[in-house]
Image: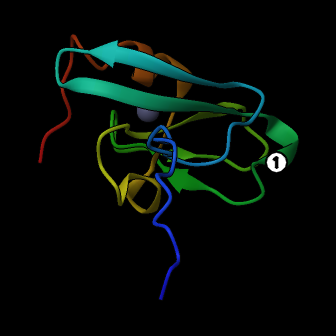
Amino acid sequence: MGRKHRRKPQEPKEVGPVQPGRTIESHPDGDWIVQRVTGSSATKPYRCPGCDHEIPMATPHIVAWPAEDPAGLDNRRHWHTPCWAARDRRRPRR
Ligand SMILES: [Zn+2]
């Protein structure tokens, strides 16, 4: 007994480590964390949800996930850069 309960300073909610090339973009469906992937770090192909085509290895592209979603980083999607840019105009099918 006798230990005083110290108030901890409020820390901002963390959504993942801050990395170079990572930005937060505001979209009609909320804020998205957008990470630019260089060709040299794209070591395997991904399927782009914008056009449903493959993003070949070594292709610079975009990784994006909802900023408000605690599991967002686990649900991140890889997009062609132009498909991500056109996302608000041409929404992906579910
Ligand atoms: Zn695409």
Looking at mark 1, is its residue's CB closer than 8 Å to ligand 1? no
What number of labels is visible? 1
Instruction: Report x, y in % for residue 1.
Output: 47, 89
Q: State the image quarter where residue 43 is shown.
A: bottom right
Instruction: Report x, y in % for residue 64.
Output: 46, 37
Q: In the rendered view, does 19 fall on the left or right side of 52?
A: right
Residue drawn at x 35%, y 60% is 71
- In the displayed image of the protein, which residue is found farthest to the left? 94
The residue lying toward the viewer, choosing from 82 and 25, is 25
The residue lying toward the viewer, choosing from 21 and 89, is 21
Instruction: Report x, y in % for residue 42.
Output: 75, 49
Q: Is residue 44 above or below residue 41?
A: below
Residue drawn at x 42%, y 23% is 84
Q: In the rendered view, does 62 fall on the left or right side of 49?
A: right
Q: State the image quarter where residue 31 is shown.
A: top left
Q: Quadrant of ligand 1?
A: top left
Residue drawn at x 49%, y 46% is 15
- In the displayed image of the protein, which residue is found farthest to the bottom? 1
Residue drawn at x 11%, y 48% is 94
Q: State the image quarter where residue 90 is shown.
A: top left
The amino acid type found where label 1 is placed reads: Ser
Coloring scheme used: rainbow
Per the image, the residue denoted by label 1 is 41
- In the displayed image of the protein, which residue is found farthest to the right? 40
Callout 1: SS: helix
The residue lying toward the viewer, choosing from 63 and 7, is 7
Instruction: Report x, y in % for residue 77.
Output: 43, 48
Q: Residues within 10 Å of mark 1 (few under 14, many from 20)?
A: few
